[in-house]
Image (spheres, rainbow, N blue to C red):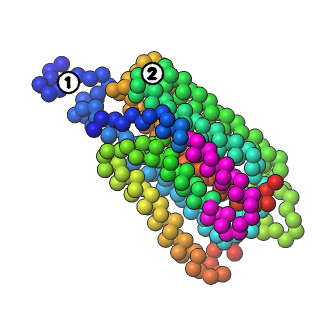
Amino acid sequence: MSEHIVPRKTYYIVWALLMALMIITAALSRVPLGEWNTVIALAIATVKALLVLLFFMHLKYENYRITWVAVIGGFFWLFLLLGLTMTDYLTRGPSGLAGH
Amino acid sequence: MHDSAHVVEQPGLRHHFADMEQQRASATLGMWVFLVTEIMFFGGLFLAYLVYRSAHFGAFAIGSEHMDFWLGTINTVILLCSSLLVALSVHAVQVGKTKLCAVLLLIAALCGVGFLGVKGVEYYGHYQEGAVPGPYWHLDLPQGTDVQNVQMFFYIYFVMTGLHAIHVTIGIGLLAVIAWFAWKGRYSPAYHNPVHVSGLYWHFVDVVWIFLYPLLYLISAKKA
């Protein structure tokens, strides 16, 4: 269970993918697709974040489940924070947001 | 040393850990627990962004038009490249090239300085344009614009990028110190937890920017 040495080639490939995705997201932002602009931009950002987390941050090679518990727990709470709050705000109708 | 039979002396091993592997796993877990608190820290701001943007999309799109697309994109490139350098520095120390590790970390830190420089140019541009909410606000907006919520976009923009910039600043200091220690030969293939966990911090800062970039710079398709 010693530390995994990620080959440099993996890092170069991940970096190339990140740059390609960045170019795609920047280019697509110029194409008016309505609602889909946001959906695509966030989907690409999520893929980029996963690439960084799994490879640059070595999560893919993490042997200890307790680390995974911490990471997944963190993102789960973030999901609760964003998800449950938006179920409130998005179902209020025209009345109740500060600033109105 | 008053050691028992199973204690093997290893440079870098603290006495409260059983072995190097346990020490490494503990350091990784500890850093991740800290990063989880950071996720929640930024998460609150992302939530504020989400709530106001979902209610005032038009105002946010107008605010986003005053972002500099190219400077934001350049900064994204800078951070992605610096993350690669940090990942390579971990590889370098794992195979015993500690001087190379130090150089890579130093270049990554300089990338961070470059990022802050570009951010500074952007902030100055916003200031000149009058896009800083408060007494100096004099942004040119068409008649009938929802000015209050354009200001809200800029409030959220400045707090989010400002907090991110503070993290970049801390990261620069961290990488510079670790680079110095690496150069002095403090780390080895057997012991390099500080390189690894500092790298985790830097990558996290990169991940935050990966989301800030489309959310702040790429809202409006009208950008030239």
Mark 1 Cα-neighbour bin, 10 Å: few <14, some 14–19, many ≥20: few
Q: Secondary structure at mark 1?
A: loop
Q: Residue at x 54, y 59 (%)?
A: B44
Residue B8 - label: 1
Residue B73 - label: none
Residue B125 percent across, percent down from the top left: 79, 45
Q: How many marks?
A: 2
Q: Secondary structure at mark 2?
A: loop
Q: Which residues are magenta?
A: A15-40
Which amino acid, mark 2? Lys
Q: Residue at x 58, y 36 (%)?
A: B82
Q: Residue at x 81, y 54 (%)?
A: B224
Q: Chain of mark 2?
A: B
Residue A65 appears in the picture as rendered: yes
Q: Is residue B19 left or right of residue B111?
A: left
Question: Between B171 and A46, which is closer to the camera in this rendering?
Answer: A46
Mark 2 Cα-neighbour bin, 10 Å: few <14, some 14–19, many ≥20: some
Nearer to us of marks 1 and 2 is: 2
Which residue lies under the disc numbered 2?
B97
| B167 magenta-colored | no
Q: Chain of mark 1?
A: B
